[in-house]
Each structure stands twice: as C-alpha cells, then as structure tokens.
Image (tube, rainbow, N blue to C red):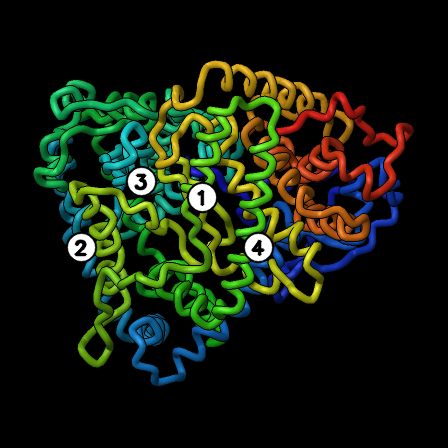
Amino acid sequence: MRKKLLALVLAAAMLVPLAACSPEEPEMPMPSVQQNKEWTKPALGENFYGYINYDYLTQTQIPFGESGTSTFDEIGYALKDDLWELITQCAQGDSDDVFDSAIRECYWQYLDLETRESVGIAPLMPCISAIESAQTTDELVKALVLMYQQYGVGSFFQFKVDTDMYDASSYALTLFNMNTCGNMKENFTLTDRGPQKMGEDMEKILEILDLEPQERKQRAKNVVKLINEIMLSITDSKYNDSVELHYFPYSKKEFAALMTHVDTDTLLSMFGDNVKRIIVYDQPQTEKINEVFVQENLRELKDYSLLCLYEQYASALPPSFYENGQKITDEDRMKNATIYAAGNLLVEEVGIAYARRMCSEELLGEANELLTSLKQSCRELIQNSERLSDDGKSKILKKLDSIVFLIGYNKNYQMPFEMVPRSEGGNLLENAIAAASGTLRQKWSKLGSGTVDRSTWDMAPTDINAVYNPYVNSVTLPAVMLSKAAYDPEKGYYFNLGRLGYMLAHEMNHAFDSNGVMFNEIGTYDPQWLSEEDHAAYKEIQKQFIDFYSKYKLLEVYNIDGEKTLYENIADNGAIQCLTNMVDDKEDLQQLFEGVAYGWASIMQVSDVLIRLSTDVHSPAEARVNEVAALNDKFYVAFDIKETDAMYVAPEDRVKVW
C-alpha cells in the first residue's frame, strides 16, 4: 500500500542501448564494463537523461543472473561491503551490546554445521506433523494457526495490524494478501520464472515425506496449478493504493458468511478478544481462496502450507538438506552467514548496529537541515498556488506541518525475542523460529492498544528505499539512504540536493498526490476534507499530467500509461518544483538537475522493460528525468533550452503540481 521511491529494481527502464547479460558469472557482484559504440551521445536538449548518463549507459553491463542494474544498485553493493565488515567485526569481537551479541551468535550458529545437522528439522516437526495429519480443512485451519502463532509463518491467510484508514486514530485487523513465497502476480502469471521456482522448491520440501520422485513432481505440479488460479484473482498491483478496491470491513459474523469454507472462529482465535471487525484488503483473492479451500484440494492446500514453512526457514535448515553435494568453501559459508544475519534472522538488529556506526549526529543534523529547507520551499509553493482556495491552502499547510519524518533508524527499538547463545544450548533454527514468532507477536500487540503511534517504524535501516505512508502521514528515510553511495558531500550541495533532496521531496509530495490528497493530516481517508472546488481544480491538473505522460514513447514504440503512473508522476514533479524553488544560480541548477538524472541511471533487458511498462506504477527512468525536466521552467534557464530542442515544451503547456 505504501509508495516506494527507491527500491533496488524500481522503474529501471531506459532508452537505448539495452545491455546483454554477461555470459559467465562474475566473482564479485559488481557490473562489468563493456563499451557500447553503437549509440551516439544525444544532445542535451534532445535527451537530457541520455546526455548526462551516457558513460553509465554505454559502459555498464548487466551482472550475471540479473535483469537490470542501476545507480541505486551501487548503494546495495556498498551496503553489502559495509555489512560484511560490520558482521565480521561483531563475530570476532566481545561487545556485550545486545545487538552486537545477537549478531555474533547468529554468525557462529550459522557456521556451526555439526549442531545444525544434529538438530536437523526437529524444531519444525510439530508444525509439519500438524499439517500432514490434518484430515479436513477445519483441522488444517488449526494447523495453520499453530504455524502462524508459534512459527511466525502465514500461508493462505495473512493478517496485518495497521492503522484503520477510515479512523487513523485506531488500529484495525486486516486480512492481507496470502503468502505468495515472494512472487508478484505479474511475475507468476506473465513469466515462467515464478512457477518454475515454486515447483522446484515444492519438490524439495516434499523430500521430507520420503515420497518417490514421480509423486513429488506430480504433487508439485498440482500445487503450482492451484496457486496460479489464486494468483489470477489478485487485484492488479497498479490499484494497490485504491482505498475503494482495498477496504472491505466485516464484522465477525459477516466474515464467517464470506469465508463459508473456513473455520473463521478458529482462525481469528489468534487475536483473542481484540477483534471487533476484519478489513479484507483484496476481496477477489479472498473469495477465490474460500472457493478453493475445500476438501478435494486438501492435499494441495497442505503441500503449499509446507512450502510456506520451508521458504521461511530454508536458510536455517541443515546444510545437507539443501546443498545436495555442492562444494561450498569456507569463504562462501562466511559470506552466507553474513547474508543470513543481515537479510533473514536479524534484519532490524543488524540494521540498527549498522546505523549506529554510520549515522553520526552530524550526518543526521545535515539531513534534518535539508528537510527543513524542503518543507519551507514546499510551504512557499503551496502559499503561492493559483489552483488552491485560501481554505485549501490552510488545510494543505496543516497537513504539511503534521507530516512525521523518520530519518535514519528507530532509536527506541527493542528485540522482541531472546537470542539463546550456543553456551546455553542455542541453535540457529530454534532462534530463527523465536525471532519470527516474536516479531509477529510484537506487530500484533498493537491491536486493541489504543492510540496509534504515528512515529512507528515499518522499515529496517538497511532498506534501500524511501516511503510515504498516507495512513499515518509519515515519511521514512532509512539510514542506508544517507550512506556515501547515496549522499556524498564531496559531490557538492546541489548535486546531493538532486539525489537525497529529491528522495525526501518526492516522498513529501506523495502527501498531496492524487491518492495522498484523499487523506487528512493524521491519515484518515476523507475525500471531503478539501472542498469540491479544490478537488475539481486538482482533477484538471491530474488530467493534464495523464495526457502529457501518455504521449511519451519508450524505445520510440511503447507508450507510458499516464493514468496508472499518475500519482508517482505528481510526486516527481512536485519534488522538482520544491528543489528548483530553492535555487536560482545557473550553475547550481545544472548541478541539481545532473544529480536527479544520475540518480535514475539504469539499464534493463527489453523483456523486463515491457513487463515493467504493464505493471509498474512508476514511469520508466528516462521519463522520470526527461518529462520532469521538460515541465520545469528552471530547466530551460539552466541549460538554455530552445524551441528547436526536442525536449522543449511551450510555457503554457508546462503542467505544474503547485
């Protein structure tokens, strides 16, 4: 539901050239270099994105096994090195800091192969046995409740406790999308990658039951077929932010009537007496799950639930379970231990240990000073906006002042479980189970807890992302987005204004995009909080954005869906308005625009470009630079853009957010 600006593979399409994959896997996860001489450097006024990023686009090759790469991937490469250094230091040290100690235990327990083999999969067997022994769907529901409560793993029914979007002062229980084992609907239904991997993983988990290979293969096929049927029912991701399509409140009695094939009393017993109503997030998917949750599908329902359990704990299982005779070096094991600690068991703990070392008070102070300047610039734009009434300006400014900014990391975080050390008999798998279940209980504890805490963090410090949450009116910028790979003071203030400043301004402007403008200052969905006149004036602006972006052609063939990408395009253009409102000097403006362009440099295989065009709510990278620049008056001042230039847009046609 949240708008994500900076995911590693976010909106990574480009013009030409499109690089090919390297034929051999490189030793290090860094892009190799291969000069592409087929593409002539475009003129600045023809393709600003291509002009600024020419060296990157022509000299970068997509790493082996990846569908694309970008300058944001460089943040990930640097983070990987930083985490390797951090975790190995913790492992070799003797710090009694609770997070450092947990990291040290996780690292050595991962490398303790003898203990992992002796423990085997025994900690999972109560759950596996409960699932396997289920003779009816009602008994399966009981097993799934056990799996959720004691193992922290959801399958067909996944619940979230989050702000009630119709009353942002309270929490609500939401039945969210099912556990898809990491697959997006589009990846599963438009490509063969999702089904193929799911089938392979399903066969692997069925080895536990000592089935013959042919039976494993057939049962895996049956599971993939069932999940594909459910996947087809999921509401398209381009509608993820539609309240009308994702908010269906039910009383317990109404929920039972909706889920006629499911024992909802047992299902909801996980939450005690705190459930007053249930919000169904994806009604079509919920109805499909109810449809297939019948006795004749019991075998497939049980098998997929086992797969969800396996996916959660695969990396903590005995190596003999998944290595299949592969030769794994000690160095590879140490790297894998680092990856597991940072990406699986101790995501938050590793993130905070990283942030404490990286985020000095001076750095956080610089980020907050920049934030103050951006808010003031946005305030000036709102005050001078010609489309807003005086009452509208007053309400919009109140919302701007009410935005909660979470920068760096959560200094109040406490581990929701105890890491049992090896000296006391602790082992990797049992600690992984304790971590998953403890984290889930911590999240569920908010239900019935009273007033919503709008300063709650929902991201780890190492998430390469920045997020606006409309349901609490907050912006989150994790610590990694302040790392040198993302924010480098040596490159100058204005270049960084085009990168870090752009991230913050983009998320801040999501508060006022076509979706965010429907929520009031505390995050309650209230389309009437602005007047009909203000909404009507904004609708006209939105129509102009839709028309403008829909005319843009990628690779000179493929059009952008201006309606699907509307709210992200608004956030992009609102952000650049905020930035350029702070700068008048020509050279400073040039640095700012170059920072923006460099921040979106990316290459991607054509096949994935086309999938992104049909599924991503963000415009392709090239358009996120060129269209934003072409609509901004100061771009013309900075680079002396003439009417004869291809990017030129007449002043009267330059649609603006403010």
Could you tell which of marks 1 and 4 lies nearer the N-terminus? 1
- Mark 1 in CB contact with mark 4 (< 8 angstroms): no
Identify the residue at horizontal 39%, vertical 26% (top origin): 234
Residue ID for mark 1: 197
Separation (CA) of disc 3 from disc 2: 21 Å
Quadrant housing residue 419 = bottom left
Could you tell which of marks 3 and 1 lies nearer the N-terminus? 1
Q: Please tell me which residue lies in front, 230 or 208.
A: 230
Identify the residue at horizontal 62%, vertical 66% (top origin): 27
Separation (CA) of disc 3 from disc 4: 61 Å
- Where residue 344 sits: x, y (%)? 37, 59
Residue ID for mark 2: 125
Could you tell which of marks 3 and 2 lies nearer the N-terminus? 2
Q: Residue furthest right?
A: 644
- Where residue 457 sits: x, y (%)? 36, 51
Q: Please tell me which residue lies in front, 477 or 293.
A: 477
Residue ID for mark 4: 370
Identify the residue at horizontal 69%, vertical 54% (top origin): 23
Quadrant where the C terminus lies? top right
| Residue type, mark 2 in image | Met
Separation (CA) of disc 1 from disc 4: 44 Å
Secondary structure beneath dot 3 equals helix
